[in-house]
């Protein structure tokens, strides 16, 4: 289960880095930049603490 979670997270992080790079270069929307920065921050928190990252993801829904 751990290896599957790590593979999914690596793919997710790779995908978010691509979106982050493309979003900053090709998009002038401030909201999109903030959204990508927010999820990059969530990814960093996920690396540091894999248990409490869910509460940061759920914060965006409220």
Image (cartoon, rainbow, N blue to C red):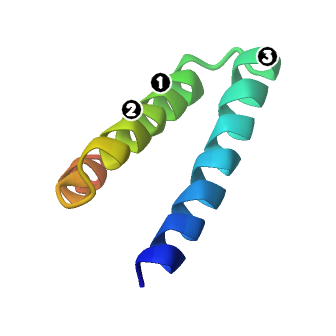
Dot 2 falls on a residue whose secondary structure is helix
Dot 1 falls on a residue whose secondary structure is helix
Give the residue displayed 42% in from the left and 85% down from the top. 1
Residues under labels 2 and 1: Cα distance? 10 Å
Q: Which residue is mark 1?
A: 34
Q: Which residue is mark 2?
A: 41
Left or right: 12 in relation to 49 = right
Circle 3 crowding by C-alpha within 10 Å: few under 14, some 14–19, many from 20: few
Q: Which residue is mark 3?
A: 25
Expressed as whole percent of the image width and height from the top left, the position of residue 54 reads 25, 59
| 3 and 1 marks in contact (CB < 8 Å) | no
Expressed as whole percent of the image width and height from the top left, the position of residue 25 reads 79, 16
Give the residue displayed 51% in from the left and 25% down from the top. 31
Give the residue displayed 28% in from the left and 42% down from the top. 48
Instruction: Say above or below: 46 vs 37.
Output: below
> On the image, which quarter does residue 18 sit in?
top right
Circle 1 crowding by C-alpha within 10 Å: few under 14, some 14–19, many from 20: few
Residue 16 numbered mark, or none:
none
Expressed as whole percent of the image width and height from the top left, the position of residue 55 reads 18, 55
Give the residue displayed 41% in from the left and 76% down from the top. 2
Dot 3 falls on a residue whose secondary structure is helix
Residues under labels 2 and 3: Cα distance? 19 Å
Left or right: 25 in relation to 33 = right
């Amino acid at each position: 289960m751990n290896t599957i979670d790590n593979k999914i997270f690596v793919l997710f992080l790779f995908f978010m880095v691509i979106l982050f790079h493309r979003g900053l270069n090709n998009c002038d929307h401030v909201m999109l930049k903030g959204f990508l920065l927010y999820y990059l921050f969530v990814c960093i928190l996920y690396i540091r603490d894999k248990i409490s990252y869910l509460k940061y993801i759920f914060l965006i829904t409220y």
